Amino acid sequence: MSELKSMEKKDTSADAPEARRGGRPPAGTDPQKRHQIVEGAGRVFETLGFDAASMSDVAREAQVSKATLYVYFQDKEHLFAAVCGERRDRNIAEMIAMLDVEKPLEAMLQTFGAEITRKISQPYVVAAHRIVIGVAERMPEIGNEFFEQGPMRVVNAFAAFLDRHAARGNLKIEDTVLAAVQFLELSQATIFRPRLYALTKEPASEHEIEKVAASAVRVFLAAYRA
């Protein structure tokens, strides 16, 4: 009987690993540790590039063991997606916050279109698109997450902005999601794809960005102004 009670005590403690660890999060769930890894990985990818960087490089820069690194991220592709995700979320939050329906429509479209192109032309954004395209066929979950949490978040927020202007009688649009995509594509015309395919190495000048955005606004309002 005493042996049974001893075993029961051991089982109870085994079922409560949190108590033994002083309440630390289970392996792979500590947000501070994850942030530490992602920040370190970001520095490595910026310095070495995706192809040259290794998980050993990331572990060394983030000051964690490789075993810990693999608890949080199963491979380099998923780690890179996480790095892109954090930066993307900051950029998207800033862009969405710009959409002020109380400001003049034409000026707001110009500002938003130009800022979209500035953000998407940044070197790490271009690199992220290339890498995601490269792994999307064998890792579709990365491509899906990148698209849904990136471009589609911007599209949906912008479509909601257009809905409000349509409700005020400023625009006449049947499908605001389609119209949002059209404007975003117009704003990037001649700038993003040449960067994506390495036809041009440097981001577009401010003059070119503003010029393309102004053209996008003219075309968009010609089609949709009430």
Image (spheres, helix red, strand yellow):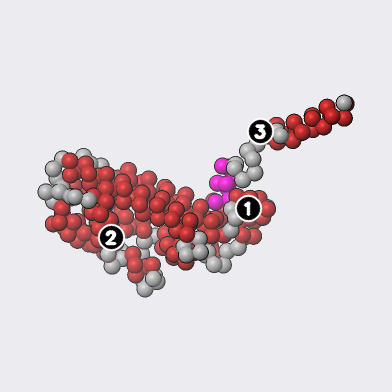
Residue 160 higher or lower than 41, as above or below: above
Distance between the alpha carbons at the discs numbered 2 and 3: 49 Å
Extreme residue toward the bottom, this view: 199
Rendered location of residue 142, percent (x, y): 48, 57
Crowding around mark 1 (Cα neighbors within 10 Å: few <14, some 14 to 19, many 20+) is many
- Residue extending furthest left? 226
According to the picture, the residue beneath numbered tag 1 turns out to be 69
Question: Which residue lies at the image location 47% right of the left edge and 65% below the top edge?
Answer: 137
Q: In which quarter of the image is residue 30?
A: top right
Disc 3/disc 1 C-alpha distance (Å): 21 Å
Which label is found at residue 185? 2
Could you tell me if residue 43 is visible in this image? no
Q: Quadrant of the N terminus?
A: top right
Label 2, residues with CA under 10 Å away: few <14, some 14-19, many ≥20: some
The structure residue drawn at horizontal position 87% and vertical position 30%, both measured from the top left corner, is 3
**Residue identifier under label 3:** 23
Report the Cα–Cα distance between label 1 and label 2.
Answer: 38 Å
In the image, residue 13 lies at what x, y percent? 75, 32
Q: Main secondary structure of the magenta part?
A: helix
Extreme residue in the right direction: 2
Position of residue 122 relative to residue 155, above or below, is below
Amino acid on which the number 3 mark rests in the picture: Gly
Q: Nearer the viewer, residue 207 or 172?
A: 172
- The answer to whether residue 70 is magenta is no
Amino acid found under the numbered disc labelled 2: Glu
- The x and y percentages for residue 59 are 63, 55
Q: Give the range drawn in magenta.
A: 31-38
* Mark closest to the chain's N terminus, 2 or 3: 3
Q: In the rendering, at what x and y percent does residue 117 appear? A: 31, 58
As drawn, which residue projects farthest toward the front? 1
